Image (cartoon, rainbow, N blue to C red):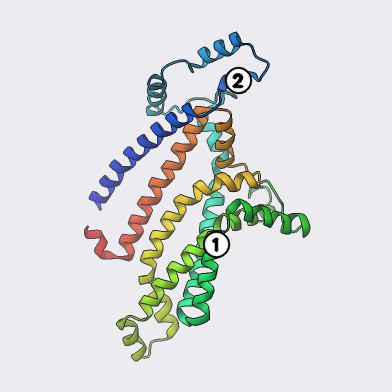
Amino acid sequence: MVRLLLRWLVTSVLLLFVVSALTFVLISFAPGDAARAILGAKGTSEQYAALRQSLGLDDPLPVRYWEWLQGVLHGDFGASIFSNQPVTEIIASRITPTLTLVISSLLFSTVVGVALGVASARRRGVGSRLTDIVSLLGISIPNFWLGLVLVAVFAVKLGWLPATGYVPFEAAPTDWFKSLVLPVVTLGIGGVAVISKQTRDAMSAQLDAPYVAAMRAQGLPERSIVFKHALKNAAIPVTTVMGLMFVGLFSGTVLVENVFAYPGLGLLVVRATAQHDIPVVEGVAITFAIFVVLANLAVDLLYGWLNPKARLT
C-alpha cells in the first residue's frame, strides 16, 4: 500500500507539471490576443502595446511560465486578465455544477450499463444483440448532436424539462433534478454503451466458470450466485472502465456545457480560451488534472479491494 501511494504521488506531480507546461505553451501560441480582446477592435497600436506590457504578455514564454509556477507553488493561481478576480474564486464558483454533472453522469452510466450488461449475460441471445446495438449507437452518436435533439424534443416540443441553465440543489431540489436530466443523459449515454458491453462480456465469462456450476449444483439461489459472486468478480474490469470514463467525462463537459449553457468549468474554459485568458485556462487544466490523479488512485484502491492479489504488486 505504501509503495502504491508513493508511486501515485510521484506520477501525480509529474502529470500536473506536464499538463501545466503543455497548456501554457499551447494557449500562448493559440490565435488571438488578450490585449485586443480586452480593448476591442477600436484600440490603437499604442494602447495594445501598453496593455500587453502591463499584463506581462511581452515577456518571454519561459519567464511567464516560471512566474506563474512560482505563484502556484505558493498557492496563488493568479488572477483573470479580464476581471482581475482570483482564479481560485472563479473555479470555486464553477466547480460544483461540473462535479454534479460528472458524478451524476457516471452514476447514470454505471447503473443503466450494469443492469443492461447483467440482463444480457443472463439471457444471451436477443439480450446480447440488444447490448451490441445500444453500444454501437451510444458510441457513434456525437454528444452535441444528441444534446440538441433532446432539447428540441423534451424542452422545446414537450416542455417537460429546461433547455439550459443549472439550478442549485439548495434553491429548489425538483428544479435541480430537472436541470440535470438532459445534460446527464447527453454526457452519460456513451458510458452506458461501454459499461453495458464490458459488463456483459465479464459476466458471461463468470457465469460460464466452473465455480458457478458448482454453486448451482449445491442448490444456491440464482440471485445470490449472480449478484453476490459473479458480479463481484466481473466488477474488476468494469471498475477500470469506470475510472477511464470518469476521466473522459471531464473532457466531455466542454461540449455538453456549451450546448446547455451550463455554468461549469467546461463553459468557463471555452470562454477563457477565446479571450486568451491564460491564468483561467491554466487553473481549469490543473483542476481537471487533479481529478484525474484522484480518480486513478481511487481505481487502484478499489481494484485492490476487489482483487486481493493486486495488493501484493
Residue found 63% across the figure and 50% down from its top: 169
Asked if residue 23 lies left or right of residue 155, the reply is left
Other residues around mark 2 within 10 Å, as few (<14) / some (14–19) / many (≥20): many
Question: Amino acid under label 1?
Answer: Gly
Query: Helix or strand or loop: what does disc 1 sit on?
Result: helix
Q: Position of residue 118 (x, y in %)?
A: 47, 75
Question: Amino acid under label 2?
Answer: Arg
The label number, if any, that marks residue 14 in the structure image: none
Contact flag, marks 1 and 2 (Cβ < 8 Å) = no
Image position of 306 with respect to 143: above or below: below
Q: Nearer the viewer, residue 53 or 177?
A: 53
Query: Helix or strand or loop: what does disc 2 sit on?
Result: helix
Q: Position of residue 167 (x, y in %)?
A: 66, 47
Image position of 82 with respect to 174: above or below: above
Dot 1 or dot 2: first in sequence order is 2
Image position of 105 with respect to 30: above or below: below
Residue at the extreme top: 46
Residue found 46% across the figure and 42% down from its top: 288
Q: Position of residue 12 (x, y in %)?
A: 33, 42
Q: Which residue is mark 2?
A: 36
Res 108 seen here? no
Specify the quadrant of the image occupied by residue 72.
top left
Q: Quadrant of the C terminus?
A: bottom left
Q: How many tags in the picture?
A: 2
Q: CA distance from mark 1 to mark 2?
A: 42 Å
The label number, if any, that marks residue 138 in the structure image: 1
Residue found 52% across the figure and 63% down from its top: 192
Q: Position of residue 311 (x, y in %)?
A: 25, 59
Specify the quadrant of the image occupied by residue 290.
top left
Other residues around mark 1 within 10 Å, as few (<14) / some (14–19) / many (≥20): many
Asked if residue 59 lies left or right of residue 176, the reply is left
